Amino acid sequence: MLPSGNRMRRREDFTLAVRRGRRAGRPTVVVHLLRQDDAAPSGTAPLVGFIVARTVGNAVVRNRVRRRLRHLVRPHLDRLPQGSLLVVRANPRAGSARHDELAADLESALDRVLRPASKGRR
């Protein structure tokens, strides 16, 4: 389970991360990461939110995918910068993906958005 202090709850946080954050897509997930600037209070825990749309499957499938993603993100919390916003959006293939496939896609996407930005790109 994801700790309560790391859960993203406000719509504005989701919108901000998706519109302004770095994005990395994989077949089962898309990850958006917005690193907060120096204006964010130091020591603020990173916030993580999940988007699992109806295209993923019925309510049972969507909730299973959301639980899997929460479980998979937890070990990566220490890699996220303080005060950052992370949104994990499940693609339709996530509903039928095996646990190890979902884990590999999530880790690959996180590695990509956490990599230092190259010149000329965000």
Image (cartoon, rainbow, N blue to C red):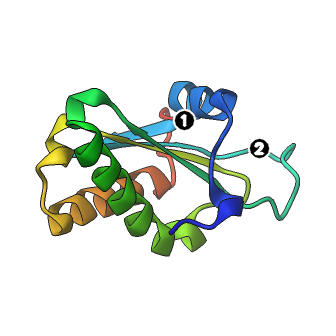
Q: Vertical placement of 82 versus 10: above or below?
A: below
SS of the residue under disc 1: loop
Q: Residue sitting at 29 percent across and 55 percent down? A: 64
Disc 1: CA contacts within 10 A as few (<14), some (14-19) or many (>=20): many
Lower sequence index among marks 2 and 1: 1
What's the distance in space between the residues labelled 2 and 1, CA to CA?
A: 12 Å
Q: Vertical placement of 16 versus 66: above or below?
A: above
Determine if residue 27 is in view.
no
Front residue of 7 and 61: 61
In percent of width and height, residue 31 lies at: 40, 44
SS of the residue under disc 2: loop
Disc 2: CA contacts within 10 A as few (<14), some (14-19) or many (>=20): few
Q: Residue sitting at 23 percent across and 64 percent down? A: 104
The residue carrying mark 1 is: 21
In percent of width and height, residue 70 lies at: 44, 60
The residue carrying mark 2 is: 37
In percent of width and height, residue 30 lies at: 34, 41
Say which amino acid is labelled 1: Gly
Q: Residue sitting at 58 percent across and 34 percent down? A: 17
Say which amino acid is labelled 2: Asp
Q: Residue sitting at 26 percent across and 65 percent down? A: 103
Q: Is residue 42 left or right of residue 109?
A: right
Task: Mark 2 and mark 1 in contact? Answer it, CB < 8 Å.
Answer: no
Determine if residue 75 is in view.
yes
In percent of width and height, residue 35 lies at: 64, 46
Q: Vertical placement of 89 versus 111: above or below?
A: above
The label shown at residue 115 is none
Q: Is residue 64 left or right of residue 7?
A: left
Report which quarter residue 69 is drawn in: bottom left
